[in-house]
Amino acid sequence: MPSLDELDATPAQVPTRDVEVCLDGQLVVRMAELTEEIDALASAAAARPRKGGAPIDSRLREARAELEQVSAKAGEQTGALTLRKAIPQGDWMTFVDEHPPRPEKTTGRDRDDRWAHGLVNVDALIARIADFAHAWDGQEFKPGQFERALLPRLVGGDIGEAAKAVVELYEGRRDFHVARTISDVYLTASSAFSSPETSESPRESSTAGRPAPSSEATTKKASE
C-alpha cells in the first residue's frame, strides 16, 4: 500500500475504457441485415414440414456464408476507440443534472436506457462525445482529429456504445452500491427472521427453526 506522500508525489492515472468500433458503416449495416435474415430463415426452417424446405436451406447457407465474409471484412476495419474521464466528477454530475433522461414512455427514452443506463439524456452526451475521445488503437488524437477522421465514419450503434462507456467511467461503482444495498437488506431480513425477539414462534405443526427429533424421542412418543 503506497503511503500518502507517495500518492501525493504520483499523478493519478486518468481512467479510460476501450470500445471496438468498425469504420465501415455499410459493413455494419449489412451484418445486421444478414443476421436478421438468418434468424428469420432458421425459424422458418424449424417450423416447416419435413419435406419441401430446400429453398429455405439453400438461402440459409448462402446468408451464413455471406455473413462470414462480411464479418471478416469488418474485422479488418475494426479498432479500439479509447474514451477517458475528460472532465472532473463534479462537472459530470452537473452535466447529468442539466440533461436528465427523458421521461418513461416518451420518444428517446429507450435510447437513454440502452446506452446511458437511464441516467442521462444520451443524445446530449453524444453531442459532446469528442470531449471524451482520447485515442484510436493507441494513437492519441490531435486537436480536432477525432471529429475530422473518425466521427463521420461511426454508425449510430458504435457512437451509442462510446457514450455508454463514458457513462460507465463516471458511474462505474453504482452497480456495486446497489448490490451492497441489496445484500445489506437481505442480511438484515435474515437476522430479523432468526432473532427470537423479532420473529414469530413457529406453529405447533411446523418444524421451522426446530432441530429434527432424535430417533429415541420419536420411538418413546410412539410407545406412549
Image (cartoon, rainbow, N blue to C red):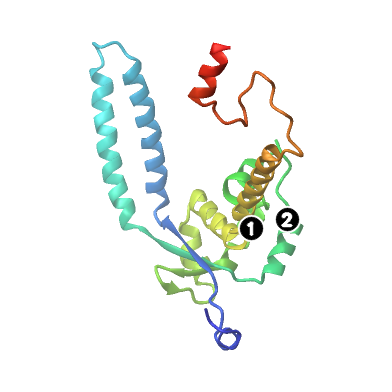
Q: Nearer the viewer, residue 9 or 122?
A: 9
User: Label 2 amino acid?
Assistant: His
- The first of marks 2 and 1 along the sequence is 2
- Residue 29's place in the image compared with 176, above or below, is above
Quadrant, the C terminus: top right
Q: Which mark is residue 146?
A: none
How far, Cα to Cα, is label 2 from label 1? 8 Å
Q: Is residue 108 something one can see in this rendering?
A: no
Q: So how many labels did they put on this image?
A: 2
SS under mark 2: loop
Question: Seen in the image, is 6 located left or right of residue 24?
Answer: right
Q: Nearer the viewer, residue 1 or 140?
A: 1
Q: Residue at x 71, y 68 (%)?
A: 91
Find disc 2 in the rendering and name its residue: 99
**Label 2 Cα crowd, 10 Å radius (few <14 / some 14-19 / many 20+):** some
Rendering quarter of residue 61: top left
Q: Residue at x 43, y 56 (%)?
A: 21
Q: Are marks 2 and 1 in contact (CB under 8 Å)?
A: yes
Q: Residue 94 placed where, x, y %?
A: 74, 64
- Residue 115's place in the image compared with 41, above or below, is below
Q: Residue 33 placed where, x, y %?
A: 40, 37
Find disc 1 in the rendering and name its residue: 125
Q: Is residue 154 something one can see in this rendering?
A: yes
SS under mark 1: helix
Question: Seen in the image, is 157 located left or right of residue 187?
Answer: left
Q: Residue 97 placed where, x, y %?
A: 75, 58
Q: Residue at x 38, y 29 (%)?
A: 39
Rendering quarter of residue 11: bottom right
Question: Seen in the image, is 24 located left or right of residue 61?
Answer: right
User: Label 1 amino acid?
Assistant: Leu
